[in-house]
Amino acid sequence: MARSTAMKAAGLILALLIFTFFSLAASSSNNQIQILNAERRIDLSSHIVKVFLTLKVENVGTSPASEIFLAFPPSQADQLALVKAQAAIGKKKKKSYVHLDVNPTQLPDAPNGTKYFSISLLNPLSSGETATLEVLYILTHSLEPFPAEISQLESQLVYFRDSALILSPYHIKQQTTFIKTPSTKVESFTRVEPTKFAGRELKYGPYEDRPPYSFSPVIVHLENNSPFAVVEELLREVEISHWGNLQITEHYKLVHAGARHKGVFSRVDYQSRASVKGASSFKHLLASLPPRVHSVYYRDEIGNISSSHLRTDYRKSELEIEPRYPLFGGWEGYLCYWIRATTGRLPFSSLLMASVTSTSALVVPLPRPHTLLMLMPDNVLSQVVLPEGSKDPSAAVPYPVEQHLETKYSYLDVVGRTVLVLEKKNVVPEHITPFQVYYTFKPIFMLAEPLMLASVYFLFFMACVAYLQIDISIRK
């Protein structure tokens, strides 16, 4: 019993020593880096907030630094959709940018709820050296409509909440924040001197010598009439056939997430001056399709829609869709559209590459998916239906997604088709990039369905011949 107690005490002491070591290591890492200049530009021109952050960092410690930490307040932790970083190399006209790896991480001495990302530098930053980093992060659902209800004749006003000071675990010698507004109409904003508003730009700063984790909350009340088009659910099905056909089917459930509409909708007023009497609504959608597609159609829950325009060429295809009615905020039952678009018979030779071995590994670079531009999907579920007989499927996606396998039965299937399911939440247009699907497939399986059809027809004709030749009458 005493021995067990001593072992537990030793284990606890060891855990405390390890925790203290990592705490001191993180603290020393934060102390040896300082930000010489930080410039942040916030773009509020749409319902998706884009923030461009330029950091000039310096190593003031004695040991090399291999990573830089970014900090985000708890109010933005769940709204972060994307964080990207790149390093500037060279000067002026010879300047180039190199992509840097960004990964979520944790710091032991962090304030409650603060979320961190670690930027891995190309080369460790030696003592006295400086580096310039370009960071892009995107926030969703960060604009709050106020008032929450507006009439057809009113403009849409929103709240944006942030900090005049950049939240950072490092000491910042100089920093400036610029907020780009969609229009010149700004109802109010928090003043943290020096503050300046001119045209469509609100400037906070410059601020000098701010300690780590400095924070100064600000609220900006401004006009934003961009349509808050949100896709609550997006189901995409990509069906691959080795007979030269690839079909993409998508289902969208659209919702206008802006200020709810109140009062009566007037079609006459909307048709006369839609830019004023319904400025926050949207009446058409633009879908970007792969080049050289055909057999494209779409429908909503109650039937086909014929108000569309398809423009195709060898570089891209665009489909302009006009719903039955303009979409306003708050019409949840009216706004729930299931739009089905099938891009059948894509040029398969440019989409699939196979080796000549008997267990060929097939790589399918999917084209830019059929996506409605300027939409913000909350949840995207992509199902890649592989040919029957495929094995060992996997996907190479440039961002984290949840993956699992399912089985689907279609026409003339015997054992079912393997379905690779990819799920991604909080999606922004920057996530719409091609990805690769790898799987093994033996060409002999392509003969399964023709042989099955030939066997069925053969047995049917043999049964017909037997029926005609056999006399089953009771009396001659």
Image (cartoon, helix red, strand yellow):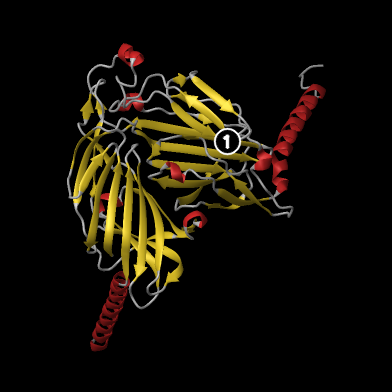
Residue furthest out toward the top: 268
Considering the numbered disc 1 on the image, is that residue within a helix, a strand or a loop?
loop
Amino acid identity at mark 1? Pro
Q: Can residue 169 be seen in this view?
A: no
Name the one closer to the observer, 239 or 152: 152
Q: Can residue 66 be seen in this view?
A: yes
Q: Residue 363 in the image: state x and y as whole percent.
A: 63, 50
Residue 328, image quadrant? top left
Q: Residue 156 in the image: state x and y as whole percent.
A: 26, 29
Q: In which quarter of the image is the N terminus?
A: bottom left
Looking at the image, residue 184 sits to the left or right of residue 459; the answer is: left
Looking at the image, residue 211 sits to the left or right of residue 385; the answer is: left
Q: Residue at x 41, y 43 (%)?
A: 428
Q: Residue 433 in the image: state x and y as whole percent.
A: 51, 45
Residue furthest out toward the bottom: 3
Name the one closer to the observer, 12 or 343: 343
Residue 109, image quadrant? bottom left
How many numbered dots are placed on residues in this image? 1
In the rendered image of this protein, does residue 172 appear above or below residue 25? above
In the rendered image of this protein, does residue 323 appear above or below residue 288? above
Q: What crowding class fits label 1: few (fewer than 14 Cα within 10 Å), some (14-19), or many (20 or more)? A: many
In the rendered image of this protein, does residue 195 appear above or below residue 153? below
Residue that label 1 marks: 290
